[in-house]
Every structure is written in C-alpha cells, then in structure tokens.
C-alpha cells in the first residue's frame, strides 16, 4: 500500500489507514473518504494530507 504518510510536525511515519482508525474514529467525513486531513497518532496534530506526502517540509531543516 502507498498510504504511508509522514507527520510534518514530529516526523513520525504512519499509515493513513491506521490514523483513520485510531485517531479519526467516529468522524463522519472519514467514513465517506472525503477527509483531506490526517491526524498523527504520535503527537495528535492534524494536517492536510498533502503535507504528509513527498519530501519533508522546509522548517524541518531549521
Ligand atoms: Zn506528529
């Protein structure tokens, strides 16, 4: 699967499906697959999916 994403805040790498189950349970938007956000299972911050894909964000390099 290619649903691995990286948290732009803490750098934690996790599966989108995993975060959906663990962090987003009960969210109706997710049930319909419309949610454009992911929540990090480690630091519990929410960010747009586009931020979690591709290369890390510039601020990670200080
Ligand atoms: Zn995080």
Image: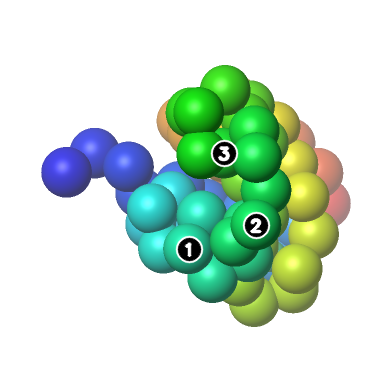
Report ligand 1 position as a quadrant: bottom right
Q: Does residue 37 appear left or right of residue 54 in this picture?
A: right
Of the numbered discs 3 and 1, the one sitting upstream in the chain is 1
Residue 51 at least partly seen: no
When the figure is inspected, residue 42 is found, relative to residue 52, above or below; the finding is: below
**Residue drawn at x 77%, y 50% as measured from the top left:** 46
**Local secondary structure at mark 1:** helix
Residues under labels 3 and 1: Cα distance? 9 Å
Q: Which residue is mark 2?
A: 26
Around disc 1, counting alpha carbons within 10 Å, would you say few (fewer than 14), some (14 to 19), or many (20 or more)?
few
In the image, residue 34 lies at what x, y percent? 57, 23
**Residue drawn at x 81%, y 44% as measured from the top left:** 59
Q: Which residue is mark 1?
A: 21
Q: Which residue is mark 3?
A: 30
Residue sitting nearer the eye, 45 or 51: 45
**Local secondary structure at mark 2:** loop
Q: Does residue 8 appear left or right of residue 62 in this picture?
A: left
Disc 1, disc 2: CB below 8 Å?
Answer: no
């Amino acid at each position: 699967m290619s649903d691995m994403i990286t948290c732009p805040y803490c750098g934690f790498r996790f599966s989108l499906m995993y975060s959906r189950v663990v962090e987003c349970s009960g969210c109706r938007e997710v049930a319909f697959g419309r949610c454009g956000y992911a929540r990090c299972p480690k630091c519990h911050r929410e960010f747009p999916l586009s931020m979690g894909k591709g290369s890390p964000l510039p601020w990670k390099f200080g």
